Amino acid sequence: MLGPDRVDLDLLAMALEDNSGESSWWVDPRSGKVEFCGPDDDADSFEERGLVSVEPLGSREAYANMSELVEGVQSQRAQELLHKAILGRRPSAGSRTHCPTSPSCAPNGMRFTISGAATRH
């Protein structure tokens, strides 16, 4: 049986998140190699070589995975902030978190607009 130590888990995660519909991902069950099949590639050739297609996760499955991960976080405060993050809510003004849309977080040469989008200045 193929162990997780023989699979590039970063590539496999990317494959599971790719819902583009323009490409597909395949895994060699013998070696664990994860391969990308782009729009110009022949998907049949991957199947002919004995590779197994990776079916991407739907958004509900991905959300359920994130939610399950958050439940395992020990810190109650961190758990609350992560729940807000996966729901798409910003932390409250009184929280002591590092907000990525804060002007102090802007990279050199960038500033944030009222909407929070970064622009060059």
Image (cartoon, rainbow, N blue to C red):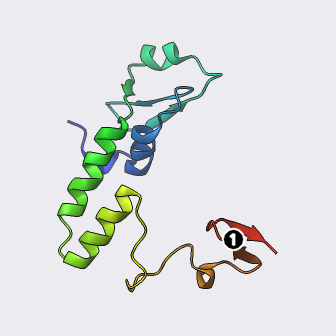
Q: Residue at x 32, y 30 (%)?
A: 29
Element type where label 1 sits in the image: loop
Could you say which quadrant of the image residue 91 lies in?
bottom left
Residue 89 appears in the figure: yes
Could you say which quadrant of the image residue 113 lies in?
bottom right
**Count of numbered tags:** 1
Quarter in which the C terminus is drawn: bottom right
Quarter in which the N terminus is drawn: top left
Left or right of residue 58, residue 69 in this image: left
Residue 79 image position (x, y, % from top left): 24, 70
Residue 81 image position (x, y, % from top left): 32, 71
What amino acid does circle 1 point to?
Answer: Thr
Q: Residue at x 39, y 86 (%)?
A: 96
Q: Outermost residue, right direction?
A: 121
Q: Is residue 121 above or below residue 2?
A: below
Residue 7 image position (x, y, % from top left): 35, 45
The residue identified by callout 1 is: 113
Q: Residue at x 45, y 44 (%)?
A: 14
Left or right of residue 84, residue 18 in this image: right
Q: 95 or 109: nearer the eye?
A: 95
Q: Please tell me how crowded label 1 is: few (under 14), some (14-19), or many (20+) other residues with Cα within 10 Å.
A: few
Residue 75 appears in the figure: no
Q: 117 or 58: nearer the eye?
A: 117
Q: Is residue 71 above or below residue 39?
A: below
Q: Residue at x 37, y 29 (%)?
A: 55
